[in-house]
Each structure stands twice: as C-alpha cells, then as structure tokens.
Image: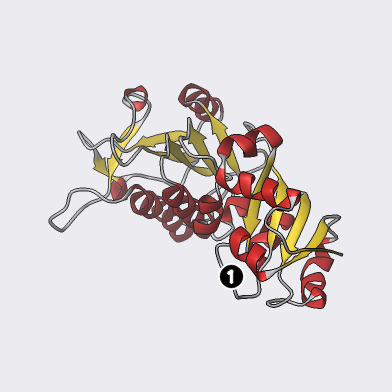
Amino acid sequence: MKHISSLQNPTVKETLQLLEKSRQRKSKGLFVAEGLNELKMCMKAGYRFRTVFFCEDDITTDELHAWFHPMKTEAAFYAVSPEVMNKLAYRSGVKNAVAVVESKKLEVKSPGNKENPFYLIAESVEKPGNLGALLRSADASGTTAVILCDPAVDIYNPNVIRSSVGCVFSVPVMVMTPQETLAFLQKNSIAVFTTFMEKSVSIWQQDLTKPAAVVVGTESSGLSDFWKTAGTNVNIPMFGMVDSLNVSAAASLMMFEMARQRSSKGASRG
C-alpha cells in the first residue's frame, strides 16, 4: 500500500490529465471512474483496473479490500490525503474510490444468440449528461445495445460515467458511422424507426415486438438527412403546449415502449 499526500505526485498529475482531457484518454487507452457501485459494475463488465485511489479518512483499507476482493483486481492501491482526494473525486467526504481503468475498443458486434433484440441508435450525441441518461434508461428498459453514430462526446468522459450511474459499463455500446449502422441493421433484419418531426406516425401504433431499432438525433438539429428514407418515421404523442422533448427523455419513452409491448405480448427480449 502506497501513500500520496501531494498534488504534484506524477501518478496524481497523470490521473488529473485523464479526467480533464479526452485526447489523453484516447492516446493512453485509459479513463477515470469514480464511485464504489460504479467501479463494481465496471469490474463486472470485464474492465481492467490500473490504480485505485481512496482516502483513509472516509473509508478504511479493510472496507476497501472487502469491497474489491471478490473481483480479484491486480490494481495498485493508493491511500491519498483529503486534499488529493478532493481534487480527484467529484464526491468527497464519503465512502468512495477513484480508479484508472483500461478502456475497451467499442467494436461492431452481431446480435449473437439474441432472439429478439432491440436497439437505441443515437446520432452525434453532444452532451455527456444526455449520453449518460440514455445509457441509464437503456439499462433499465433492457435494451440490447446502444449504437453511437459519430458521437461528439467521449463515452469515457467522467460526466458520462457519473450521469449513467455506471450503466455505461452494464449496457453494450458500439460506435460506428451511420452508414455502418444501417448496414448492420439491414444485415440482421432489424426494423428501423426514425424520429423526424415531419410526416411521422405515433410509436404507440407500431408493432415493436420484433427486432427493432429507434434512431434519435441531436438536441439542436435532430437526425441527419441520411436517415430520412431508412425506415418508418415515428413520434411520441404530445398533449401539452410543447411539441418536443429532451432527446434523453424521448429516447427513454421509446425504449420503454419497446419493452412494454414485448412484455405485454409475451415476446422474448433481446
């Protein structure tokens, strides 16, 4: 067990760079995750830990090892001063830990043996909070996977991990271009439902009990023209003064509608 009390420590400085800079995370193949529950989800998903930081004022060494022991990590553990922990962690003064983790390549995958998959396709996601909320809803609804098309935000951004409450690790995520995504969906006979405002039909009137994917766009400009002829254009019926929802709220409703239809008709879920 090593102890660190200085913010000038090279290991601390490198971790702070990973927290703050996407290019550092990408070039080194590392990212920073925080929170005991989030770290447990991360480890269960098969990620490898390099280092773990904790403050003995908030959590004892025995408590931390009891938390991580079932996972059998080979990470180096560092007990750090409150000053260092306050700099590394968003949440301070509570039982907490911060880890440097090896990232994974988010590759194109086939549905495998999933009998009836359903996907969320998110194009050019711009805000970490929105992406985290999408992943949290995907986990809760049992969505098979989330496909990110040309995302503008790094999936390993600390705010994505935080806002997803660790669901960034529990939900399969793939990153590809719109062209690759559509080819993937067509190859696997997955029905496509797009979300343009014009000439759309209620998603409640669609049969979503078969393999399906819903495609959502950005807050500012919606979906790109590439998707205009890709599938059936759907909307969420609105009963108030506004005519649209935040993208994470809209996507959540659609994912749960897919889950609801499958549950009510006894369809198997991917």
- Please determine whether, in this image, residue 195 is positioned above or below residue 78: above
Q: Nearer the viewer, residue 165 or 223?
A: 165
Which corner quadrant of the image does residue 249 belong to?
bottom left
Left/right of residue 177 with respect to residue 215 in the rendered view? right
Residue 108 falls in image quadrant:
top right
Where in the figure is residue 219, as x and y percent of width and height? 31, 42
Q: Is residue 19 above or below residue 56?
A: above
Estimate how packed mark 1 is, as few (under 14), some (14 to 19) or many (20 or more) residues with alpha carbons within 10 Å: some
Pinpoint residue 222: horizontal percent, then vertical percent. 30, 35
95 and 149: which one is in front?
95
Residue at position x 60%, y 75% in the image: 93
- Mark 1: amino acid: Ser
- Residue 264 seen: yes
Relative horizontal placement of residue 222, taking residue 52 as reference (left or right) = left
* 162 left or right, relative to 221: right
Residue closest to the eye, 178 or 35: 35
Badge 1 marks a residue whose secondary structure is loop
Mark 1 = which residue? 92
Image spot of residue 169 (x, y percent):
63, 52
- The N terminus lies in quadrant: bottom right
Q: Residue at x 36, y 37 (%)?
A: 217
Q: Residue at x 63, y 37 (%)?
A: 24
Indicate left or right for 228 with 56 as reference. Answer: left
**Colour logic:** secondary structure
Q: Position of residue 178 (x, y in %)?
A: 46, 26
Q: Residue at x 51, y 30 (%)?
A: 185
